[in-house]
Amino acid sequence: MKRFPFTAWDAGRRAMPLLSRLKGRGLIIGVPWFWLGLFFLLPFLFVLKISLAEPALAQPPYTDLIEVIGDGLVSISLNFGNYVLLWDDPLYRGALFGSIQIAAVSTLVCLLLGYPMAYAIARAPSHWRLPLLMLVILPFWTSFLIRVYAWIGILKGNGLLNNFLLWTGLIDQPLEILHTPLAVYIGIVYSYLPFVVLPLYATLIRLDLTLLEAAADLGCRPWKQFLLITLPLSLPGVIAGGMLVFIPVVGEFVIPDLLGGPDTLMIGKLMWTEFFSNKDWPLASSLAAVLLVVLIVPFVALRHFEQKAGEEQP
Amino acid sequence: MPNPRIFKPEEPWQAPEGEPIIRIENVSKRFGDFYAVDDVSLHIHAGEFFSLLGPSGCGKTTLLRMLAGFEIPTEGRIFIDGQDMTAVAPYERSVNMMFQSYALFPHMNVADNIAFGLKQEGMPKAERETRVAEMLSLVQIEKLASRKPHQLSGGQRQRVALARALAKHPKILLLDEPLGALDKKLREQTQFELVNIQERLGITFIVVTHDQEEAMTMSSRIALMRDGRVEQVDPPRRLYEYPASRYAADFIGSVNLLEGFVLSQEDNRVLVRSEEAGIDLEVIHSHPLIAGTPVTLAVRPEKVRLQNAESSLPNRLRGVIKEIAYLGDVSIYHVELPTGKRIQFTQSNIQALAEQPLTWDEEVELGWPANSCGVLEQ
Amino acid sequence: MKTLYPRIKTLALALSLTAAAQASAQELHVYNWSDYIAEDTVANFEQQTGIDVVYDVYDSNEVAEAKLLAGQSGYDLVFPTARPFADRHIQAGLYQKLDKSKLDRWDNLDPVILESLTDIDPGNQYLVPYMWGTTGIGYNVDKVKAILGDDMPLDTWRLVFDPEIVAKLSECGVALMDDATEVFVAARAYLGKPVDDFSRDAVAEAADVVSAVRPHIRYFHSSQYINDLANGDICVAHGYSGDVLQARDRADEADNGVSVAYAVPSEGAVVWTDVMVIPADAPNPEAAHQFINYLLDPAVIAPITDYVAYANANAAAEALIDPEIRADAGIYPPAETREKLLVLKTPSEREIRDMNRAWTRVKTGQ
């Protein structure tokens, strides 16, 4: 990512008269802030507000925080009980931990599979790169749901995979894959792999190959060239790709619900239950708020790293 | 060899028994149908500052990359220190290279960049640190050791690249346009530093450059390349004074070229009739020439002098000054002969002030000594 | 209750930002379960009345409920299950009262069914019964008999709750519904305990029953069993009567050697009723009344029963129903079976939450 160098930024700010700065720059910076405020902050505040209410049999099914009791008296009642419950109840902690664990393992597997793919594409002859990238992107043209359903057909007891393995004689009993954690991992890794491959490809294709020649020239063998040069320099891509997998997978609902077994406990599923089955919108909202906070930590770390990397490769 | 000159006997390439440190034998490199390097043979000796000079696309960088091991010759062989290195991987060669882009590792600081090669060969830490310090002081950037490459100026990066390439004490250092990215003033200053370092360390330098001035300043010998082939290999002075071809004469500095044919040859004194000059010209040339052979005479502008009453130079030509270019230290004059041919000559401006200055449309008489002129056979 | 497609499709519906378009006088927005109407029902209504029907479908009560609770759903007519959904919706004020002057076919409705709704809807002011059915056990006749022997009675909850039996059956696959209330009520019926007790202790007892068999349960899902029963991928499923019968019909059509049967367990099974309601904020209640009245026509509702394999609440339609459907004990249970049917009491909100959270724990083995 090309970043505006901060020094030039500051110099420009000093040089520009205050008024025109407010007009021109303020307007341009204001647009993304406005966007973030309208479509991120505001909805989040709604969620936060609901998380502090109590469920009620009403429309909408939660209490108002602010109530006019009459005589100009206003009562504000904030209910932090949901957050206490989330902390106290091992179910929610377990779900959060389970989600993070599944997301972490999936991210790792995606990176292990996606890195060689991205590397191969970036090093392929230039007329091959576009078709290869298209092959990575092509599955997106089919609905995500249909692709996950297809995995049911592949993994189930008398599905494609088992029938194939039975036919080859490798197994004599169908393997139990569907409705196991393995199926969840297969589904997640399959669905999210392109999100790793694309940013990795973008960093690897930008890598200056003379750096590898320089390393070779200084006596560095190919494998060490990769470890000492390619890998550290592609770290921004690794982190970007990793976050693109990790963050959505923590909240993933569809894949574990369709491919997972009953013991696949993920936070997305719990939120579904709280929202739909229990009509407990406040608790579902506090789950969402906690999840957001948990996810913001790695995201901020990513930004920090990217910024550092951006300075290194001006 | 035309026109032998006296060389210092210690010049390594003149000792027939000396084993060259690099032998390039009939090396060609083909990319598809295109010959980037076409049947090149060169011997380079230990301690030389050898330049590969030529315009872009002449194959000089490809040749250098074959020495580094990044390209493998399509034909021919390369010997380094007597060993056949034609197809040896770059990481197994004892040569190091300084890249045109410097190729500094952006994620490592200066000291780590310099130590990189040493780490690869497993040098103990203490020794490595001593070596890095030595290199930092060699290129005078001791204070920059902990900076990252993006925090350095262009000149500082160039020094880091040099220090990194020298850190392993290679016998041979390959430099690809080492000064190409520097501005003119820094470039001139650095040229001398490079030569100093090379002489101090006694390492063989092989430099690729497109800048003839740079090659002339630094090199012990220059290989002038064109279209994948070597046109001429000679020390700078000889390359300048006695270019072997019109291409060589034209590429290095400016030159007056006069077409003609041989009238006669007595000993090494040759008389050439040139219609362009309008007179017969006298040159010294030892190589036997048959009368009637078409030749081109090459005279450097600074060899051409103004005639006056006392001087008795041969090759007298009269003409009118048409252009004057004032360059500060010297001025270049374009003199038009009655035949229409223009001759350039330069004059130091100290002289110009002492005498009556030359002006436009002034008629002058020019001449040059018979031994200041090269003879280029077709 | 009726589910055909896995719940996930409904999620997409629930999340879709496009609420039903603004209704005009000539538009009626209907929100019904998927595959819960005959193929030509809507088209015929449009032809008769000239009203355009915008017909949306859902696959779970929860999704429909979430839309109603959020408000401004834009729907004129919805088909929730009476207990516990319509019950609490009435309490939350989500519906408007019916104008019976516009429902001249009201008397066609089965008075017994109407009477059964009066505890949650006194005077039948809000709810119009549509279809009803039971939740019982679907099984693969040949496989289950091969494992358990011919003597074992199959109309019992032991098929899904007795650890010994479920362990035996687990190799051919046992599935439970993913529905806390349905499963816990069935588990309490299996224990012979009162099914209308939703106290924490009662829920814990039921949860223990499920926990004991959980390792042998292939999955918890409220619709997937239809396909899997029909294909022979599982051999026992806890499910809705109509869905199991649909699996039976599919297996028959595929002629794959799988024969599926439905049983109402002798310990007692839940009987449920789906009702038609008009949301309080319905844009076109007039058209909604017309559509209800249209569905009260015996000639309209009988073919729907023939098509969806659920019993309707229209007493006047009985004679018009396909005799084969009418005689199917799975759809119209005989008198002795009816005695075993249990009407669900609506748990309180707190009880539902406790039950659902206990359910999540049981399923995940936490």
Image (cartoon, coloured by chain):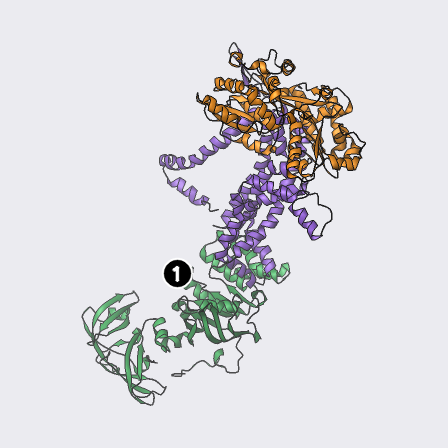
Chain colours: A purple, B green, C orange
Q: Split into 4 quadrants, where in the image is the N terminus of chain C?
A: top right
The residue under label 1 is which amino acid type?
A: Lys
Q: Position of residue C310 (x, y in %)?
A: 63, 25
Q: Is residue B108 in sight in this rendering?
A: no
Residue sitting at 42 percent across and 34 percent down?
A: A30
Whether residue C2 sits left or right of residue B33 in the image: it is: right
Residue furthest bottom in the image: B266
Q: Is residue A65 above or below residue B253?
A: above
Height in image: B13 above or below A206? below
Q: Residue at horizontal 61%, vertical 58%? A: A223
Q: Residue at x 23, y 68 (%)?
A: B323
Label 1 marks a residue whose chain is B
A243 lies above or below A212: above
Q: Nearer the viewer, residue C311 or A14?
A: C311
- The single residue placed furthest to the top in the displayed view is A71
Relative placement, left or right, of A80 versus B174 is right
Write down the residue under mark 1.
B185
- Residue B233 placement, left or right of C265: left
How many numbered discs sit on the rendered protein?
1
Q: Is residue A10 above or below residue C132?
A: below
SS at mark 1?
helix
Quarter in which the C terminus of chain C is drawn: top right
- Relative image position of residue C101 (x, y in whole percent): 52, 11
Question: How far across and how far down the image is residue A262, in percent?
Answer: 68, 35
Local packing at callout 1 (Cα closer than 10 Å; few below 14, some 14-19, many 20+) is few
- Between A82 and C128, the one lying in front of the other is C128
Residue A189: image location, x then y, percent = 61, 44
The answer to which quarter of the image holds residue A267 is top right
Is residue C174 something one can see in this rendering? Answer: yes
Which image quadrant is residue B304 in? bottom left
